[in-house]
Image: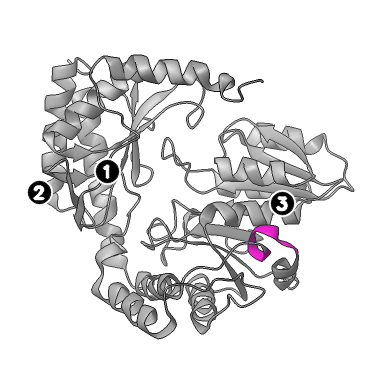
Amino acid sequence: MVDLFTKFDPLINEREALLATGVRDPYAIVMDKVLSPTEAMINGKRTILLGTYNYMGMTFDPDVIAAGKAALDKFGSGTTGSRVLNGTYSGHKDCEDALKEYYGVDHAIVFSTGYQANLGMISALAGKGDYIILDADSHASIYDGCAMGKAEVVRFRHNSVEDLDKRLGRLPAEAGKLVVLEGVYSMLGDVAPLPEMVAVAKKHGAMILCDEAHGMGFFGPNGRGVYEEMGCEKDIDFVVGTFSKSVGTVGGFCVSNHPKFEVMRLVSRPYIFTASLPPSVVATAATSIRKLMHAGEKRAHLWKNSKRLHQGLRDMGYKLGTESAQSAIIAVILTDMAQAVSLWQGLLEAGLYVNTARPPATPAGMFLLRCSLCAEHTDEQVGEILGMFERAGRATGVIP
C-alpha cells in the first residue's frame, strides 16, 4: 500500500524540527475569549489582536449583534439547504439588497464564503476555449476557481501592466477572456494599478473581475474598494468580496451590473450545491454593510493607524513589504521561518498576536509576519504595539 501522506513528509519534518527548538506552533493558537475587536485572552494573557482582518471592527457592534440574535430567534440556527432549494430566506434577499445599495449596482449574489465566491464566479464565467488571465500572486481561491473550470490559464508578473498587455496580445482576438485582479494583495498589502490594468484589459476585449476582499470598507468615498478609490467603477464587470473581513462575519458575494448576471444562480456549482448561510449570519452582514455606508470617521482613523505603524516600524529598521502604507496590511519581511517564528513568539509573549506567513501562501522564499490593523485600535494601543515590536525585535536580533 502506498501511504498517500508520504508526499507531506518534508513539511512534517520541517515543522517537527521547528517545534523541537521550543517555539510554539504559530498555526495552532486558540482564542480562549475574545474581549473586543482588538483584544482577546490567549493562554490566560490579555493580548492585542493585530492579525484578524477585522478592519472596521464590526464584530462587536451592538446593532450587528442585535440583528443576529433576532434572526436566530425568528428563523432558527440554520437553513439545512442550498440557495436554489429551501435555503433562501428573506434575510438572504435583504443581504443582497444591502449589497446592491452599498455598491450602487443592479445585481448581487451571496455565497457561503468568500472562497466560494471566487470559486463559483471564475469557474462558471470562463469555460472551454476561454482564457483566464491572472496576477501571479493571486489568492488561492482565484487559482482554485481556475482549476475547477475548463478555461486556459495565463499568468502575468505581479502588478506588471506591461506583462499583462503582452500576454493578452498573444491570445486569439476572438476568444473569451477574463482578467482577474485584486484591489489589495493580502500578503504584502500592496494595491494593484487598476486604471492602467483596466485600460489594457479593455483594449484587448477582456472582461474584468476584481477581488476587493481586503479593500472593502475603507478604500474609496463609500468604502467600496480600491476600484472606487481609483475611479474604475464603470469599467469593472464583476466585484467579488467577503463578509469575513470589514463586514465582521462570514460569507462571500459578487456584485455586477451585467444584464445577464442572474443566470449565475443556475450555473455556479458552489452556489447551487452548498448549504446557504444561517439566517443569523446574513442578518449581521446586512446590518454591518448598511452601517459601513456611513463609516467615514472609522475609515479615517484606520488610515491614521496604518500610516503610523508603518512609519514606526520602518524607523526601527524593519524591512516591510511596501515602501509606504498602502492598506491596512503591513508585512514585516524576515529571512527564514525560524526567524519569523522567533519574532512571532516574542511578540505573543509580550501580549501581541500577529500572523505568520510562508510559502506557498507567500511568494517563493518569502517569510513574513503580517499585521492587520483595525479601525478600533486606539492611539494608545498603536503605541503599545510599536513598543512591543521594538523590544521583541531587539531581543531576537531582527533589528539593531
Residue at the spot 52% in from the left edge and 58% down from the top edge: 113
| Contact, mark 1 vs mark 3 (Cβ under 8 Å) | no
Camera-near label (2 vs 1) is 1
On the image, numbered disc 3 is attached to which residue?
123
The mark nearer the N terminus, 2 or 1, is: 1
- Whether residue 132 can be seen here: yes
Quadrant of the image occupied by residue 60: bottom left
On the image, numbered disc 1 is attached to which residue?
30
Mark identifier at residue 380: 2
> Which residues lie in the magenta part?
267-272
Q: Residues within 10 Å of mark 1 (few under 14, many from 20)?
A: few
Camera-near label (3 vs 2) is 3
* Dominant secondary structure (helix, strand or loop) of the stretch shown in magenta: helix
For mark 1, give the secondary structure.
Answer: loop
Decide: is 352 above or below 316.
below
Name the image quarter holding the N terminus: top right
| Contact, mark 3 vs mark 2 (Cβ under 8 Å) | no
Name the image quarter holding the C terminus: top left
Decide: is 124 above or below 192.
below
Queried whether the magenta region covers residue 129, the answer comes back as no
